[in-house]
Each structure stands twice: as C-alpha cells, then as structure tokens.
Image (cartoon, grey):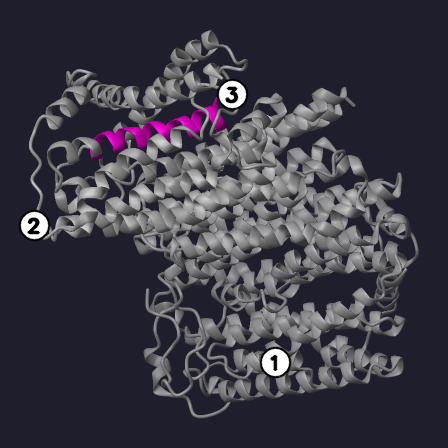
Amino acid sequence: MADPPLTAALASLNALAGGLFLLTAFAIVATRQTRGCLQLFIVQSLLLAASAFILGAEYQSLHLVAVGAVNLISKPIVIPWILRRTLSAEVYARREIDQVLNIPTSLLIALALAVLAYFLTLPVLSAVAPQFRSANVPIGLAGLLLGAYTLAVRREAVPMLVGILAMENGAFFAGIALSRDLPLIVELAIASDGLVLVFVTGVLVRAIQQRIGSTRVGELVSLREQVPGAGATSTEEAA
Amino acid sequence: MTLPAMLLLPLLAAVLSAVPRMRFVAPGVTVVSSVAVLSLASATALRVASGTTVFALRGVLSVDGLSALIVWLVSLVGTTAAVYSSGYMARTCAARPRRLGLYYANYNLFVFAMLAIPMVVEPTLVWIFVELTTLSSALLVSFENTQEALEAAWKYVGLSLMGAAIALLGFLVLFSALQAAGGEPYTWEGLVKAAPRMPPALLKAAFVLIIVGLGTKVGLVPLHTWLPDAHSQAPSPVCALLSGIETTSVLYVILRLLPMLDAALLPEMRDWVVIFGLISVGVAAFLILQVRDYKRLFAFSTVEHMGIILVAAGLASQAAHYGAMYQILSHTVTKSFCFFAAGAAVLTVTTRNIAAVRGLVRRSPAAAASLLLAGLAIAGAPPLAVFLSEFLILKAGIYEGRYVVVGLLTLFIAIAFFGVLLHINRMVFGRPSSETFQAQALGSHATAAAISDTLPRSCELILLVAGALVIVLGVYLPGPLHELLRLASDTLHR
Amino acid sequence: MLYRILANVLQVLVILLLSPLVTGVLNRLKEIVQSKRGPSIFQPYRDLWKLFHKDQVLSERSSWIFRVTPYIVFVTPIFVALLIPVLTAHPLFLAFMADMVGVGFVLALGGFFAALGAVDTGNPYGPMGASRTRMVGFLAEPVFVIVFFTVSFVAGSTIPYIVQKHWIASPAAFLEPAHVLLLAAFFMLILAEAGRIPVDSASGHFELAMIEESKSLEYSGSGAALMKWGGHMKLLVLMCVFLNVLVTPWGLAVEQRATQVLLAIPLVAVKVLLFVLALVIIESSLAKLRLFRISEFLGAAFITCVAAMIARLFTA
C-alpha cells in the first residue's frame, strides 16, 4: 500500500474518474448525435482505463495496470476503427430526433436508476473486505443499468450498440475493484470478444441499412402475434 | 487429446468453409467434421459413464457427467442438422451459392462455441463462449435477409448481449466471492468447494445477476421476447440448433450454480429457481394458444420446456434431478426433430402460417407424418420421450410433497399439450386451401422450383433417423445413457 | 478599522468600474475570433457616458415600477459585491449578512423587477422576453438549489468565504468528483443566468428571438445606462463567485494588508480574462439552442449536479 497522503489523493482521483464515468453514462442516454454517442463511449473507456491505472498505483498491482492498458488499446482505438470499417459513412451523420420518452424524462428516470444502483450495492459493499470498498462498485452497476436503459429508450441502431458497450464498461468498472486478480488471459479474451461483438453487430447494422434504408431499428415491430379474427393472412411480407 | 480435437475440428471446418473457393465442399466438410466430433463425443460419454472423469488440461478443459451429456447432445444435433442443411440450404439457396460459405463458416463456429461451453471449467471463459454463440448465430438468424429476419436478428443480438453484460458482472462478483473464501481455483469444482466460506450476500448477488443475464439467453420470461422471433425466422436447421441445444447449453451454465447454493446453505434460493421456471412454463403455455406461425409454436414450446427443466432442477430430490436430465435429453432430440419437420413443411408449402397450411397430408405425406409425430412428441404424448421425462418430474414432485408446484406444472403442461395438438391437427388434416398455391414466397431466395412436393434426400434421411430416435427413446434407454444421466443428475445436488 | 472600510470600498469600486471593461474585452475578443476588428475595449464606458447625457423618455402608461427598476437593477449587484470574495480571502465587514442562497435571492430580486418593468409598458416584445426569462429562471431554480445544497453538504457551510477555504485546503479536496461536476453544472448555470450562448444571443438584434435584451428595450437615457451597467455588473459578480469560490480560489489577499488587497486586483483580472477567453470560445463555436431545447440544456445541468451529489454519497 502506498503512504497515506498519496493514497488519499489517488482515492480522490479514482472517485473523480468514477464521477465523470457516471456523467458519460448519463450523457449516452441523452445525446442526439450518433457521432456524439461514439465519442462519449470513447471518453468512458478512457475513464475506465484511468481508473484501472489509478487502482493499480494505489494497490501496487501490475495486473490492474495491464488491464488498463488492454482497455486503453481495445476500446478507444480499435472499436471505433472496426465500426468505421463495417458501417457505412452515412450512419455517422444520423441524429435521433426523438426517443421513446422525451429527453428530460429519460434523464430523470436514469437518475432514479443510478440512485437505485447505489442502494442495490449496499449489501454487497458491506460484505467485502475494506480494501475492496470503493466508489467503483455502485458506479459500475449504475453504468450497467444506464446502458440497459439506453437500449430500451433509443430507436437508432448505433446508440443501442453503444448502450451495450457501455453496459460492458460498467460491468468492468465494478469488476476492477471487486475481482482484482482475474487472470490476464481472461481479460484479454473478454477484450477480444468485445471486438468480435462490435464487428458482428456492425455487419448486421449494415445489412439492416442496406435492406431497410435506415437504421431506426426501434420501429421494426412487425413480428408479433396477430389479433384473432384479422383473417387468414400470412404473417410475413413478400420479399 | 480427445477434447482439444473435438474443439479443433469444427474450427478447422469453419476456416475451410470461409475460404471462397472451397464453398462447394463446405457442406461435405461440415458433415465429415460433425460425424467425427460425434464419434469422439460418444467415446468420451462412454468413458465418463464408466466412471472416469476425462480431462485434457486440468483446470481448463474437463468433462464430468453433466458436461459429457451436453457435449454428446451438441454433437448429435450438430451432425443431424449438418446433414439436413446440405439438402435444405441447397434447395433454398440455389440462387445465391456464394452465401453458402458464410452459412457453413458461421455454422461451424456456432457448433465450436457450443462444444466449448460444457468443456471449459472456468466460468469467465464459459461466458466468453456463450457470447460467441450469440455472435456466430446472429448472422445465421438473419440469413434470409428479409425485413423480419433482420428485425429478429437485431432483437436477438440486442437482448442477448444485454443479458451477457449483466452475467459478466455476476461472474466478476462470483470471482470476488471466491477470493474472499480462500484459495480454491476459479473452476466449477473449486466454487462448490469454497461455497460454504463465501459471504452469502456476494453469492446471492452473483446468482441473481447470472440468472437474470443468462436467463435472457435461455428464454426465461419476461426476457424471452426475442426467442419466438429469432427461432422462427432462422433457416430450419439453424432453428434446430438454436432451440434444440443452444438454450440448453446456456441453461447448463445456470444449473452449474445450483450445487453452490446448497453448499452455502441457501436452500431458499432454490425456491426462486422453481418460481422462475413456473412463470416461464405458464406464460409459454398461454402464448402457445394464440400463435399464427408453426415455427413460433415450436419456439414457445422451447420456452416452456426450459421452464420445466428449471423447475425440476430447483426441486430438491434426486429423482427430480434425474427427471431434469432426462427432460434435457428428450427435449433436445424431440425439438430438433420438430424443426426438421417444420423445415420439411416449409419446403413444401413455403409459408409459415398455420392457417394457410391445411391438408398437408395430401401435399406431402412425409412432411405431414413427421410434423404430426413431432407435434405429438413435443406436446408430451405417451409413449414418447417427453412424456416419460415429464412424468418422472411430476412423480418426483409429488413424492417430495410439493403439491402446488406439481399442480401448476400439470395444468400448464396440459394447456400447452392442448394448444400444440390443436394447431398441428389443423395443419396436417383438413381440406387443403387454395391459398397455399398462391402463398407468398419465402424470402428472396425461393424460386418457383422450391414449391415441390418432394423433399431433398438428406432431409428425408434425417427425418427418418431423428423420428426413429424420438420413438425409440420413449420406450428404451440404453444402459450407458442411463448411467450418464444418473451421473449428470449427481452434479446438481452435491 | 480603516482597513476594513477601505477594503470594502475597493471591492465595490472594482466591481463598479471594471465591469464595463470586462464586457468590452469580451465583445472585442468575439469579433477578433470572427476575423473582424471589433470595437475598442473601452466602448462600453463611452456608451454609458453617452446614455447618461441623454434625456429619458417615459411612457405615460407606465407605473412607478418602470421608474424604480433601473435603480434596483443597478444596486443589487453592488449589494452582492459586498457579500462575495472579490479581492480578499477573509470575510469582510458585511460578509455574514447573507450567504450564497442570499446572493441568489438578491440577484433574483433584480431580475424580478426587470421582468416586471418589461411588462409595464405594454410593448409587445417586453413581456415576451420577460416570460422567456422566467422560463429559463424557473428551469434553472432546481439547479441552483442542488448546487448550493451540494456545496454546503461538501464544504459544511454556504458562506462563500468558508466554502472557498474548503477547496483551497488540499489537491485531494480540489479534485473531488463533487467539485469537478459542480464546476460543470455551475458553469452551465452562469451561461443561462447571464444570457450567453447557447441559451441566448447577447449581441443579437432580432427582437423575436431575444430573451434578456428585450427587457431593457424600452429604457432610455440614464435609465438605459443604469440597466446596462447593472447587466455588466451582474456578469462580473457571477464570474467572481464562480472563479473565486469554486474554480481558482487562490490569488486573493490572505492577510489584512492593503498592499495584498491591491495586488489581488491584477490577479483577479487575469482570472477573469481566462474565463472570458473560455466564454468567447464557447460563444463562437456553439449555436443558440431552440427555445424548447433550453429545458434539455438545463436538465443536463441538473443531472450533472445531482451526479455530483451522488458521487459524493458514494465516496463518503
């Protein structure tokens, strides 16, 4: 353990990274521009890497520093590159005019979710040893819930994808505080899995874009049971 | 060497299929590798049933009773679906042969990931392979490239990845619980051994997160909304894989957590498992009554059976766990046969609408017979396999004294039985309507030549083999298989 | 004793005399960024001098509110100047008369009378601007309250001098997430209250789009001069609160010596210049928000300061 004043400063810096992480999670719920969403995700990944580095310095764990480095390379750099290659350029110019709820209401619900996350992690925090207690766990869970909320409330495909990636960021943010000695090979595998995820989803979005002409996937709601008595029409449309 | 070989073969087949020039041999390569994997898996299952634990790398790849069962089932369905695909995809993909390579590459990757899930013993690596199944099947679900298929694929990917992220946090919390409990390795066995010393709050939190996250992928209500869409829009052999064995493999991961709860003296969590299962069975049973599409019918039936397995695993007695294992076996064999039959019907009438398909028995007797048998089998009619396993579960529940659970379960199974038979009966018998001749074409790949009354040879072969298996398993369980089921059920209540 | 009177008077004089200069520098820099020459930085002084030498024209239909408003708008920032740390780090004579909530109320008093005065004349643009200002005001209220609440929760008091001492204590306290997020939220609040981009365009002439400016359209002569000067002072006062209490609480006079107080003046001027630069960059790169989007802007500010409070709760 480092000496106390340094520890206090590092703890403060870590809390700062956590606070900004939470802020980016809120912003991902509310941003209109697709490009803005991606940039916020990059900022969030940088904050995750920063928190990993700070925790590594605080607990003198080379392993955490390595985790931070892996995240620093894969998320802010490689993932946007993959997305640029798989998605067509016009997807980046999209703006989402409306969401399922209007933005101030969305933000208020997101706020309620963040407070809920705090209360949900209280029993977990009291069960772990003192050196594992930090702001990371509640903020990570809040990031997870807010990412899921983004998925629910948005209509465009790329913000939904960013929501999924933000959920993983949140899970990781809590994970670097809770499970510090996870083998590095596992961390590398999870990171590369994230890259494959982005690739496959990018290809799928491109297919949707080519077939339907837009990426407003929230409006694809044709697959459901028909109301009885609507006649013996087939449930699928012709090609 | 067996285990790495079983993993490398599908990978190799995937790489070969992906090479553009090799796409004409892709079906053959896939079939060959699937048969090889099936033989290796059968050998492994026999060894496990005779009492040894097979491992390749201690702590990384290892197979015990439950794993061996799942591995064998994956390889079985993988083989039958591969043979079926060679005929089915050749018929539906006649206009666009270039996409076949993509199909087989993803198919083999999918099988590889599903084989790895039971073999790997470290939970986070298992999570990675669960994600890999989602990613490799995403492009398979959207293969037909219609608007509905793409919508189904998007819902599938979105919800599955959301569940996977939640499950990731659950696994990380589980790891920290393990660290708090002492120096066991992070494997399923190590977790069970360390469970008594784990802080209960952490274990409970991890369990809730994992069951919510992976439950999305299994199709537990209320996170099941993607399942009917994805499992009906995909091409039929893929549906057989998805419904038959993929949801079961993810359920396997949840089942691995149950002995930990017992070891940590948290028996009340098992009640939650039973409740989750019952909700899924109930909702699925009611939803079966109002489907309009027969592949969706089978997909809802998958939700129902996943619920039944979960209920059986949540009950405390050994007989119930044996019933759960038997249900896994019978469901896999039967559901894959259901989708093969559905695929045959699709090839014959090119529509999935129940109301538009009438009098199938006059159009194609083979398709009609298999569809009827499939419907009877999956609904749980005696003397077929599913009836036997459900009966075992209900009997075990009565002996244990859980009358409410058994009563509700019987009610829901009866409702589902009624629903499935109603729809199948309407489809198979009845006067053929003239609409079927003007039915909308299936996707952009079907041409007029696809509407024919003869099925491809390989499809007929598989229908015969799978149908025979369904009938045989209802009356006869080979000795090693029984032993394997018993060993598998042992892992549920250590 | 002499020192305390001197320091107080100096503080008020600085606010009074330097505020038009701040606005002049802001306008000149904005024009330079847009590749124009811009007016001289002393132009606001000349405008005020010109206006004071003109006659006032008062509408017969207006009431005493219209006549009283310029004086109130002029006096309230001066009153606030007595309460906040402008040059000194230690509390002065009247510093405990009111805390930051009181500062907010006093400034709101000025805004209240300005809005009433705008409605008083019957000119159509006045009430339009007044109602829009009220909308922005009431959306900004929750942000104000939460900001002050968080500040008092963190620093233990709402008196600006005491709050300032808390942030100055150590780098750890300065880098607290609550602090950084509060900075962001308060900055957005200043943009809303002072009527700058992205909430309102301060240099626009199109009456239908005005929010702040239309309140002072009807005034002339010394009334207009007092309204303008009051506006300049309000901006400088808000800047002082932001800079001296939250962002850069250094550079103020610590001991009770006249030389230190005089030295603080150029230091505060440097800080204000940096803030003006930041403001110019924002004004030149963002566009004005549509009226209905202002609620989203202030909603974002609200979320930021609630995030600050949550971050404080999580780390405590």
Mark nearest the camera among 3 and 2 is 2
Residue C69: image location, x then y, percent: 23, 42
Q: Which residue is mark 1?
A: B285
Q: On the picture, is C232 further left or further right than B46?
A: left
Q: Is residue B440 left or right of residue B468?
A: left
Q: Residues within 10 Å of mark 1 (few under 14, many from 20)?
A: many
Write the residue at 28% across / 35% down: C196
- Assess whether mark 2 and mark 3 are in contact (beta carbons under 8 angstroms): no
The subunit carrying tag 2 is C
As drawn, which residue projects farthest toward the front? C1
What is the secondary structure assignment of the residue under circle 2?
Answer: loop
Q: Amino acid at mark 1?
A: Ala
Residue A168: % across, % down: 58, 44
Q: Quadrant of residue B75?
A: bottom right
Q: Is residue C265 above or below residue B249?
A: above
On whether disc 3 and disc 1 are found on a single subunit, the reply is: no
Tell me the tag on residue C89.
3
| Number of numbered markers | 3
- Residue B374 x/y as whole percent: 61, 78
Give me the chain letter of mark 1. B
Taking depth in this image into account, of C126 and B325 the one nearest to the observer is C126
Kindly report the secondary structure that dominates the magenta region of the rendered protein. Answer: helix
Measured along the vertical axis of the image, is residue C213 above or below residue B384? Answer: above
Horizontal side of B210 relative to B312 (left or right) equals left
The disc, 3 or 2, on the residue closer to the chain's N-terminal end is: 2
Q: Which residues are magenta?
A: C227-248
Q: Secondary structure at mark 3?
A: loop
Residue highlighted by disc 2: C60
Residue sitting at the far top: C259
Q: Amino acid at mark 3?
A: Ala
